[in-house]
Image (spheres, helix red, strand yellow):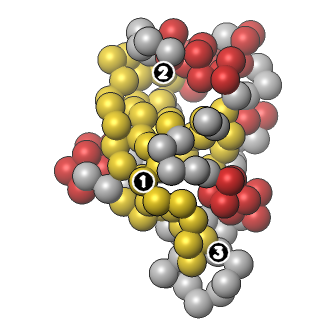
Amino acid sequence: MAYWLVKSEPFKYSWDQFVIDKQTTWDGVRNYAARNNLKAMKKGDPVLFYHSNEGVEIVGIAKVAKTFYQDPTTEEEAWVVVDLKPYKKLKKPVTLVQVKADKRLENMALVRLGRLSVQPVTDEEWSVVMELAAEKA
C-alpha cells in the first residue's frame, strides 16, 4: 500500500464539502508529476487531505475509491483523475508549520515540492503525521 497527499484550497473545495459529497472526482490536475502520482494510486490507498493557501494544514484522511481514468473536464488524453472518498477527519489537524519544524519530515514532498498538488508520502512520513495528529498509525 502507498500513501499520498492531495491539496485543495478550502474556498474551492474543503474537507467539510468533501464529507457532505461523500465522494469526489479529483480533477483539474495539469502537472505531469502530479498526474503520474494519480496514475500510481491504487484503490484503498490512504490519502492525506491538505488545505492549502488558507488553513495550511492536513485535516483529514481520504481513500482512493477508483483508480485513474480520463479527466472528464478535458478532451486532452494526457490528463487523468481518481475518485476519492473521505475516511476520517484528523483528531488534531497538522499544520505546515508543524511539518516544517519536525526534522523527521524535512524530506517530505510537502516541504520540498510545495507547489505539487498530488504527492507521495513515505511510510515513515505517514507515521509521523499520524503521531502529530494524535491518530494511530
Question: Would residue 94 appear left or right of 89 to someone viewing this image?
Answer: right
User: Residue flagged by tag 2: what amino acid is it?
Assistant: Val
Residue found at the very far left of the displayed protein: 20
Instruction: State the separation of the CA atoms marked 1 and 3.
Output: 18 Å
As drawn, the label of residue 65 is 1
Is residue 13 depicted above or below 86 in this figure? below
* Closer to us: 63 or 25: 63
User: Residue flagged by tag 1: what amino acid is it?
Assistant: Ala
Estimate the x, y position of residue 89 in percent, counting from the top left: 32, 29
Mark 2 vs 1, N-terminal side? 1
Instruction: State the separation of the CA atoms marked 2 and 3.
Output: 30 Å
Q: Which residue is mark 2?
A: 94
Question: Would residue 118 appear left or right of 49 to someone viewing this image?
Answer: right
- Are dots 2 and 3 in contact, CB under 8 Å? no
Mark 2: few, some, or many residues within 10 Å (few <14, many ≥20)?
Answer: many
As drawn, the label of residue 39 is none
Question: Which residue is at a point 41% across and 22% down the rendered structure image?
Answer: 93
- Are dots 2 and 1 in contact, CB under 8 Å? no
* Closer to us: 106 or 78: 78
Secondary element at image label 3: loop
The quarter of the rendered structure image containing the N terminus is top right
User: Residue flagged by tag 3: what amino acid is it?
Assistant: Trp
Secondary element at image label 2: strand
- Are dots 1 and 3 in contact, CB under 8 Å? no
Residue found at the very far bottom of the displayed protein: 75
The label nearer to you, 2 versus 1, is 1
Tell me which corner region of the image, top left, top right, bottom left or bottom right, holds residue 68: bottom right
Question: Would residue 119 appear left or right of 129 to someone viewing this image?
Answer: right
Mark 1: few, some, or many residues within 10 Å (few <14, many ≥20)?
Answer: many
As drawn, the label of residue 79 is 3
Mark 3: few, some, or many residues within 10 Å (few <14, many ≥20)?
Answer: many
